[in-house]
Amino acid sequence: MTSAEVSTTTPSSSATDPAGGPGGAPRSAGPLVTSSQPAQVPPAAEGNLSDLVLDWERDDPGAVCFSRRDDTGAWADVTTAQFAATVRAVAKGLLAAGVRPGDRVGLMSRTRYEWTVVDAACWFAGAVSVPVYDTSSPEQVAWVLSDSGAVACVVETPEHAALVAGVREQVPTLRRTWTVDDGGLQELQAAGRDVGDEDLEAARTVAGPASTATIVYTSGSTGRPKGCVLTHANFGDLARNAHLVMPDMLDEPGASTLLFIPLAHVLARFVEVLCLAARVRMGFAPDTRELLADLQSFRPSFVLAVPRVFQKVHAAAQHKAATGGKLRAALFARAEQTAVAYSRALDTGGPGRALRAQHALFDHLVYSKLRTTLGGRLTRAVSGGASLGEYLGHFFRGAGLTVFEGWGLTETAAPACVNRPGDQRIGTVGLPLPGTEVAIAEDGEILCRGIGVFTEYLNRPEETAESFRDGWFRTGDIGALDEDGNLTITGRAKEIIVTAAGKNVAPAPLEDRLRAHPLISQCVVVGDDRPYVSCLLTLDEAAVTAWGQLHGRAGLDVEAAKGDPAVLAELQSAVDHANGLVSRAESIRRFRVLDGDFTVENDCLTPSLKMRRHEVLRLFAADVEALYS
């Protein structure tokens, strides 16, 4: 064991809490298997996240910290001096509008430069930012703003402003709203001209490391969103320690990243802070429909994304090959197999001469072209938010894009564990970050404690108490640690299926393998209190079209594919392949293809593209019943 300390311990109760955990949480019933790494950067004793902006401005005012699209669509650079000046001006505007240290400010926008300006302005004003997904429904907006007690809100578009106005009676604390696209930030800057620098500095320095920096609401994939109270230290200390475990990625000359996941998501917020701490240039891609074009023009050296993005890139490459005819499709299939074999060989003594030669050939013919479509400089990425799957991890590494899978929750300020250069274990989410400790309880639940763990669920003291055990946060995820301390996620406790025969089935591994098939977009494994396990499948529209062209069925669409015997046979083959992971009692016996896909619009996916299992089961209840009729 060179990278982490692994031990078996029986945790003792807190000396200040004789009942065991926060609010009297029950004591542990037995020993925990733990994996930990000590912090490499000591916790900040003073200051807050605004210091990251000021320190970079002081040390290098001409450095480019952000790039944004200008009115012509070209990338325009923003220096640290320019960014800091704008942030100060907007912060003064907030103060002039009556926002005081500790006040909550809602922020509803796509991922764009102005989002980060407002977020940093809240730090400078001593306020607490409350992200709201730009795709939120009126009910969701009303809940987040009212539960957080927001006194002001910055929105992106007039449509957002109208939505907030429509729920204003449900948010009695809300006093002001500004709209970015209607000159709201300019209005704030103008209003703050009479606020003195000394007043701004007084507000900026109110917050310390333990002060609340933001309240981030959970995605709602397992119920109503809860407000996670996260401090300046949660983000700042975690970012400074994470920087040290990925210096190759963050410190290379010209390092840059393109942010396209929603900034309302905790992972994007962490990236925002990490880039300021590591002094890495960051660009913004607000419209994911234009993502490939943005990647090609911005040319990032690394990205952070949810697994769905990598699944889409893989599916798009397969689709492009399939539309080029049988020869190109066969070439890509062979290249894909070679990439996976090459990557696996890296973990088992290294590829042999023949495999190296094949890999070099396909790098010239296929992999280099794939990397070019992603900008040409992108060789490393981090995936989080859900499981990537071992197959895709090996495919991308074999194709020259190493994806370091990580794991964390809103409650852990995003990453708690991550694979890292020189110590990657594909199929795991890696080791704990410095300053973080994970443990496996007797029932397999993953527990976590450390510098990134939140302080409380806002306005929910009982749920906060229930979520901790002897000082450990109960994540609700199920997993295991290997002998070197790497964590593997096997599912969520609330998603474990118990069949009528009493067999426990973790759906995630089966679903990950099924989603790796090009025809399959999404899947849900079902079987609670049923005689056997089944699954619901949705089809990828583009992949179906390409498959039809390749197999003499030009014009094949999803509706026709649902009943096409050859398509169903292909899907059965995918199910059989997934079943190779599990025992007979856990295997999928039947599947059903749904009419449409899971989307944010039908509430089957969260804005961060995680599946809302409970909503899928509600919406498609009749299809589930049909599997057992």
Image: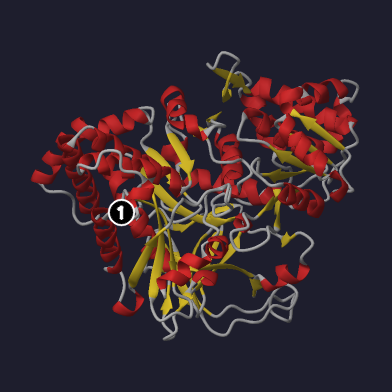
Residue 584, compared with residue 349, is above or below; it is: below
- 10 Å neighbourhood of mark 1: few (<14), some, or many (≥20)? some
Q: Residue 478 location, x and y as percent? A: 48, 70
Q: Nearer the viewer, residue 18 or 38?
A: 18
Residue 426 visible, this angle? no
Q: Residue 261 location, x and y as percent? A: 54, 40
Q: Secondary structure at mark 1?
A: helix
**Point 43% across, 38% down: residue:** 249
Residue 521 visible, this angle? yes
Q: Residue furthest left?
A: 354
Q: Residue 57 location, x and y as percent? A: 66, 25
Q: Nearer the viewer, residue 157 or 11?
A: 157
Q: Which quadrant is the C terminus positioned in?
A: bottom left
Q: Nearer the viewer, residue 551 or 392?
A: 551
**Point 84% across, 32% down: residue:** 94
**Rendered image coloring scheme:** secondary structure
Q: Nearer the viewer, residue 183 or 558?
A: 558
Q: Is residue 284 left or right of residue 349?
A: right
Q: Which quadrant is the N terminus positioned in?
A: bottom left
Which residue is label 1 attached to? Answer: 391
Residue 84 sits in quarter: top right
Q: Residue 235 location, x and y as percent? A: 63, 47
Q: Is residue 510 left or right of residue 448?
A: left
Q: Amino acid at mark 1?
A: Tyr
